[in-house]
Amino acid sequence: MIVTMPKRLLVVLLLLLNLQQLHAQKTDLQRLEDLKLKIKQATYYDSSTVFSLGKQCIQLAKRLRKENEIGYVYQYYGSFNYYTNNLSEAKKYYFKSISVGEKTKDFKLINSTKIRLNFITLDQDALKAEDGFKELLKEAKKGNYIENQLEIYNGFGIMYETRLMYDKATESYLKGLRISEKHNKKFSTGYLLNNLALLKLKAKKYEEAKKDLERALILSTETNESRLRLNVLNNLGLVTHEIKDFPGSIIHYKQTVLEAKKIGFPAGILAAYINLSSSYLDNKQLIEASKSSDSALAIVQTYRDPLFLINAYIIRGMVSTEQKDFPTAKRCIDSVRFFLHSYNDPNFKKELIGLQSKLASAQGNFKLAYELEREYSSLSDSIREVSNENEQMRLQTIYGKERLENALTDSKQRNKILRTKSELKSANYRFVFLVILSVFLLVIAAIYIYNVRKSRKIKSVFSQKLIEQIDEERSRISKDLHDDIGQSLAVVKSKLNLFSTGKIQQIDGLDHEIGGILEQTRVLSHQLHPTALEKIGLERALNSIIEKTQSGTDMLCNFDFDLEGKVMDLETSSQIYRIIQECISNTIKHAHASALKVSVEQKNGEIIVQYRDNGIGISDSQNKLGLGLLTIRERTAIIGGRLEMKTGTNKGISLTITI
């Protein structure tokens, strides 16, 4: 007995299974997005996290049949290598991402990855990158890819900043910001506000910069974007330090340290400790400054980045000098000297001299301190922009306001002279370029005129020789008609007259004579127009003239024909027939050859016609533009072919025509 399940219960079970499957798929999709976010946030610093999470993400994307998501993982791999300055690997993964995008028709992914490739171009060629961003922006607008548009406007801003075009950089960031706010893109709004704030910081608009950063901090917290929050906190510390709010900058740098530790970003932790130590020092909290600088040094010993090493030792040296710990300060100075051998930056050299001056002054060696300050001043004058206002105040304290103004005036004057020299140099380069361009154009024009005149001369010679040949051909035809056909017809007419007048009783053999006249007429007609081509085709027509050549001369003739079933039009066949006919005629008349070979074959969709003989050839001193060869060139051009000729004294001649 078979027990059947009620239909309603079956429907309910199927519905529950579908709901369970949908729930599982929704869970997997959310997990995929979470993995992508974690990979994206780790791309600055943690290779193990990036690639292990990436592997999980790829497996999950395959299970969900979302192949395009694999392209985004490759994009994150490329970004990690870009941030670690491994550009060749970055490009490799970016190209793999584009390949996935093309396969899955994900044009947003393609556009997004090309934006990142263009940032690599920006590091090498800003003008080329600008054109790249413009083209990518058109694509992003066409596809309405909002996130991509925002990245491009951010790219424009960064590009203009590197070119010191701050107005255009601000304009680009603001364009992106308006679009981001319109579409409620909190993360994009945050990083655009952060970049705008840095521009305002450079322009010393500290309060405006602070407002933008405080707003960006709220957005980064709402979106849980730890990397953005880290940058914003650090920049808030910079702003508050500039406005002498040292307690405020200490709070922000402490939060920066915590944020960097939370995401495991060693470089971020290190930079935060250095900045925190500087704020403690300026706030006269020497014990805390010492602890922070020691923490920075402990990290930098394993990190081994020259930039951070120098900064850490300079700040530790300053703290030690304030604490009257002169041996430690001296060791820090020696360490900075050592690392400057491999990282010779004038700003760091200036900071080193400043630290040495402070140490000399703290030890009571005022003469050495004065000499170091003079060296510091000289080096500062050679740097176009004074690094920060604190250094200006320090110079003013030592030398007085008048000396500082004079130094700044001299610096501005030198900068003006340098700009003038640069403009003159640029003008000279433009002048040289125009001269070279003019000469190049004149040479091109001269070559063009020469070729035109040569072509006209060749055509004139060809036309003249062609007329001469036509006249000769007409004369030959006239002679054939008069001497052969005309005389034969006259004999026939005479016999007919004699027969009609009864002078002869029979006209035996007259039909044979008339047949001979018809054969002569047919041969002459075929020479004027090869009608056999229409009837028997090119292969048999060529075979016929080659057999006649072999039977009528002592030459050994060879003929190959293989077009693999391809049928040529009558015009092409006729021109090839005439070309071979002309070649054979030239060989018989001039070459003194004992053998010739003709081949017509098809290779890779092209028809290859070859003619070779083993005659005396044409020497360099002989005229290679005779009427025969000119005619062959013209016939080749008519059928759209390419002619190649190889010859030389006692080397025969080889003609190859490719159609």
Image: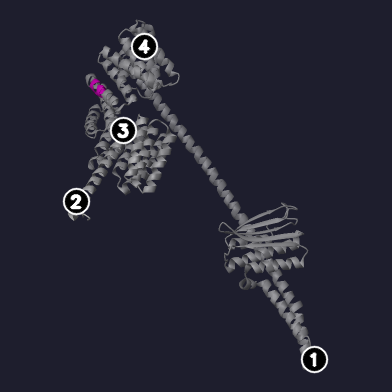
Tell me the amino acid under the disc marked 1: Gln
The quadrant the C terminus occupies is bottom right
327 and 561: which one is in front? 561
Front position among marks 3 and 1: 3
Residue under the image location 70 percent in, 72 percent down: 474
Residue 244 in view here: no
The three-letter code of the residue at mark 4 reads: Ser
Marker disc for residue 506: 1
Most frequent secondary structure within the magenta stretch:
helix
Mark number, residue 41 = 3
Crowding at dot 3, Cα within 10 Å, few <14 / some 14-19 / many 20+, comes out as some
Q: Which element carries disc 2, helix, strand or loop?
A: helix
Residue 452 part of the magenta segment: no
Among numbered discs 2 and 4, the one appearing first in the sequence: 2
Residue lying at 18% horizontally and 54% vertically, measured from the top left: 6
Q: Position of residue 235 (x, y in %)?
A: 28, 27
What x and y, as percent, mark residue 212?
Answer: 23, 31
Q: Work out how far the residue at label 3 is from the one at label 2, CA to CA, in angstroms.
A: 43 Å
Q: Residue furthest bottom?
A: 502
Residue 12 tag number: 2
Q: Which amino acid does label 3 sit on?
A: Gln
Tell me the tag on residue 357: 4
Residue 465 percent across, percent down from the top left: 68, 63
Indicate the quadrant where residue 201 lies. top left
Q: Distance between the residues labelled 4 and 3?
A: 43 Å
Q: Which of 524 and 220 is in front in this view?
A: 220
- 541 over 620 or under it: above or below: below
Instruction: Tell me the kind of residue under disc 2.
Output: Val
For label 1, the SS is loop
The magenta segment is 250-255
